[in-house]
Image (cartoon, rainbow, N blue to C red):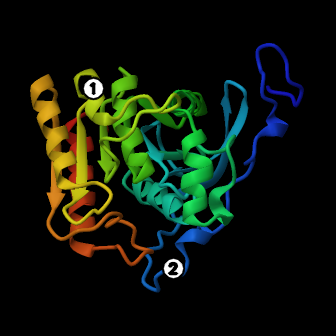
């Protein structure tokens, strides 16, 4: 149980966390939302906000899980750059309908509430301040929460993430030896190293502890095909199991059905591949 008083072992108090509860609806910077956005109901599920105890307090998360049976294979869902908003919650419900405990922790909780920010503000003010080490620790804490909840079979652990979270999937596959598989949707593979974000997936190919399926768009202006080819080469050189699919003509965020970037065919194919990848690698 965490109280609100900082102490030697808890230098940041819960009161100082910028986000203590999840945003409702879609993030401001993703508006207007497409009329045909996919909405998954909660029939047969237990779904909603939970609190995850972390090293320095508590962060909010969204979890969805079948309402009967269990424990269930566990999938960490790593947010887009927009935080845990409605689309990420819906992805959790989609996974729960497949028989998973799916949980998406708010990984910007200490740095700021991005739900009311424009995209450039998120990129300049929040993203550079989120340490990779903090993200890895929070994901580990989420796994521990799932295990203690009684609903999660964390021996069958997977991770999937989108955009900002796609890069995190590769990092987490290099971090957690207990992970069975990851699916990274258009996550950055290379970049300029900083003190808080010292390595990118291409630097960590030799350290992967679980196979990762990477899903990328040929027309992604932020992740050129040459970066994808560099990652493929790094995986091959390291002799690590993994697979990268590049969809012709697909832009960045082709899975985001609430945005103009959505492309139905690659999105549906990628989702099919995700299900097969998890099943094949022990997350089922």
- Mark 2–mark 1 CB contact (< 8 Å): no
Q: Quadrant of residue 258?
A: bottom left
Which residue is more in the foreground, 127 or 211?
127
SS at mark 2 in the image: loop
Percent across and percent down for residue 162 are 40, 53
Quarter holding the C terminus is top left
Residue pointed to by mark 2: 33
Residue positioned most to the top: 8
Q: Quadrant of residue 25?
A: bottom right
Write the residue at 42% across / 60% down: 94
* Residue 214 appears in view: yes
Write the residue at 49% across / 51% down: 79
Residue pointed to by mark 1: 208
Name the mark on residue 22. Answer: none
Write the residue at 57% across / 39% down: 130
**Badge 1: how crowded within 10 Å, few (<14), some, or many (20+)?**
many
Residue positioned most to the right: 5
Q: Is residue 111 left or right of residue 246?
A: right
Percent across and percent down for residue 92 are 47, 55
* Residue 83 appears in view: no
Percent across and percent down for residue 35 are 47, 86
The residues bearing labels 2 and 1 have C-alpha atoms spaced at a distance of 36 Å
SS at mark 1 in the image: loop
Which residue is more in the foreground, 273 or 195?
195
Quarter holding the N terminus is top right
Percent across and percent down for residue 101 are 47, 44
Q: Disc 2 or 1, which lies upstream in sequence?
A: 2
Decide: is 114 above or below 241: below
Write the residue at 44% across / 59% down: 91
**Badge 2: how crowded within 10 Å, few (<14), some, or many (20+)?**
some
């Amino acid at each position: 149980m965490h109280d609100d008083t900082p102490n030697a072992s808890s230098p940041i108090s819960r009161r100082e966390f910028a986000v203590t509860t999840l945003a409702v609806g879609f993030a401001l910077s993703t508006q207007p939302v497409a009329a045909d956005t996919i909405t998954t109901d909660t029939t047969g599920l237990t779904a909603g906000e939970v609190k995850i105890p972390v090293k320095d307090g508590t962060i909010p998360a969204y979890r969805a899980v079948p309402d009967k049976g269990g424990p269930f294979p566990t999938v960490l869902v790593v947010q887009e750059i927009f935080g845990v908003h409605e689309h990420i919650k819906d992805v959790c419900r989609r996974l729960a309908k497949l028989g998973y405990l799916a949980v998406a922790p708010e990984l910007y909780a200490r740095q700021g509430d991005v739900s009311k920010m424009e995209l450039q503000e998120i990129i300049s003010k929040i993203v550079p301040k989120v340490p990779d080490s903090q993200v890895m620790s929070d994901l580990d804490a989420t796994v521990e929460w799932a295990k203690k909840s009684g609903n999660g079979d964390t021996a069958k652990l997977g991770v999937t993430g989108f955009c900002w979270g796609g890069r995190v999937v590769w990092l987490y596959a290099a971090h957690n030896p207990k992970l069975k598989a990851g699916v990274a949707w258009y996550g950055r593979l290379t970049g300029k190293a900083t003190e808080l974000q010292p390595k990118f997936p291409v630097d960590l190919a030799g350290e992967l502890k679980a196979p990762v399926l990477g899903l990328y768009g040929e027309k992604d202006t932020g992740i050129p095909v040459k970066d994808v080819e560099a990652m493929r080469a790094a995986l091959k050189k390291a002799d690590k199991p993994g697979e990268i699919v590049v969809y012709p003509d697909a832009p960045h965020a082709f899975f985001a059905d609430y945005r103009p970037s959505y492309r139905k065919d690659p999105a549906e194919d990628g989702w099919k591949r995700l299900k097969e990848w998890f099943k094949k690698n022990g997350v089922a």
